[in-house]
């Protein structure tokens, strides 16, 4: 929440500066906003107390996130490993990005009269969607046991 407030404050400051005749280049504003927001996020993260173990255990029991960072909670809670696969999730992310950008670039290419580039980008988008559907079927199999999202 504090990072969102900081980001809003920085954006508001740049807006006021532009309205008073002190406009800043958009790249400078973007990088400054990112830097200040990240600094506030880190400071607040290190200055506030960590979340309690019971909250982390309840979160793990409900969500079952993958990754080695949850090993201690998994071990202390007695819950099994996550059914998710980080490599498959990363593949799904890459395929999702490729499908969106492929479709965007295909649209732009067709609009600007470059049908060959449009066709290639459409092919990339189509293959990425096919791969994403196949990956999704493996990632979102119905889970059994306490990891189910029922209830």
Image (spheres, rainbow, N blue to C red):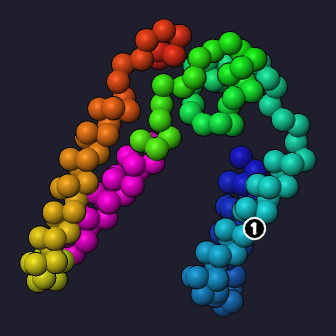
Question: Which is more toward the observer, 81 or 130?
Answer: 81
Considering only vertical position in the picture, is 78 above or below 110?
Answer: above
Residue 1 in the image: x percent, y percent? 71, 46
**Residue at numbered disc 1:** 36
* Res 17 → quadrant: bottom right
Q: Would you say the magenta stretch is mainly helix, strand or loop?
A: helix
Residue at the image point whose x is 64% and y is 24% from the top = 59
Residue 100 is a magenta residue: yes
- Left or right position of 114 against 1: left
Question: Which is more toward the observer, 139 or 48?
Answer: 139
Mark 1 Cα within 10 Å, few/some/many (few <14, many 20+)? Answer: some
* Res 19 → quadrant: bottom right
* Res 43 → quadrant: bottom right
Residue at the image point whose x is 81% and y is 48% from the top = 45
Residue 141 is a magenta residue: no
- Left or right position of 40 against 47: left
The answer to whether residue 16 is visible is no
Residue at the image point whose x is 38% and y is 46% from the top = 92
Residue 141 in the image: x percent, y percent? 35, 24
Residue 130 in the image: x percent, y percent? 20, 47
Q: What residue range appears in magenta?
A: 89-108
Considering only vertical position in the picture, is 127 above or below 136?
Answer: below
- Residue at the far bottom in the pictured view: 21
Residue 4 in the image: x percent, y percent? 68, 54
The answer to whether residue 109 is visible is yes
The kind of secondary structure element at disc 1 is helix
Residue at the image point whose x is 69% and y is 89% from the top = 22
Counting labels gives 1
Considering only vertical position in the picture, is 112 above or below 136?
Answer: below
């Amino acid at each position: 929440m504090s990072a969102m407030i900081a980001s809003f404050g920085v954006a508001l400051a740049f807006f006021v500066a532009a309205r008073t005749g002190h406009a800043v280049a958009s790249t400078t504003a973007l990088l400054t906003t990112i830097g200040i927001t990240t600094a506030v996020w880190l400071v607040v993260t290190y200055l506030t107390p960590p979340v309690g173990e019971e909250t982390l255990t309840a979160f793990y029991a409900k969500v079952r996130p993958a990754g080695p960072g949850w090993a201690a909670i998994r071990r202390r809670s007695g819950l099994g490993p996550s059914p998710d696969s980080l490599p498959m999730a990363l593949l799904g992310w890459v395929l999702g990005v490729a499908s969106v950008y492929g479709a965007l670039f295909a649209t732009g290419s067709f609009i600007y009269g470059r049908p060959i580039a449009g066709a290639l980008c459409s092919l990339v988008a189509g293959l990425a969607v096919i791969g994403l559907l196949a990956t999704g079927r493996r990632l979102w199999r119905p889970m059994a046991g306490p990891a189910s999202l029922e209830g």
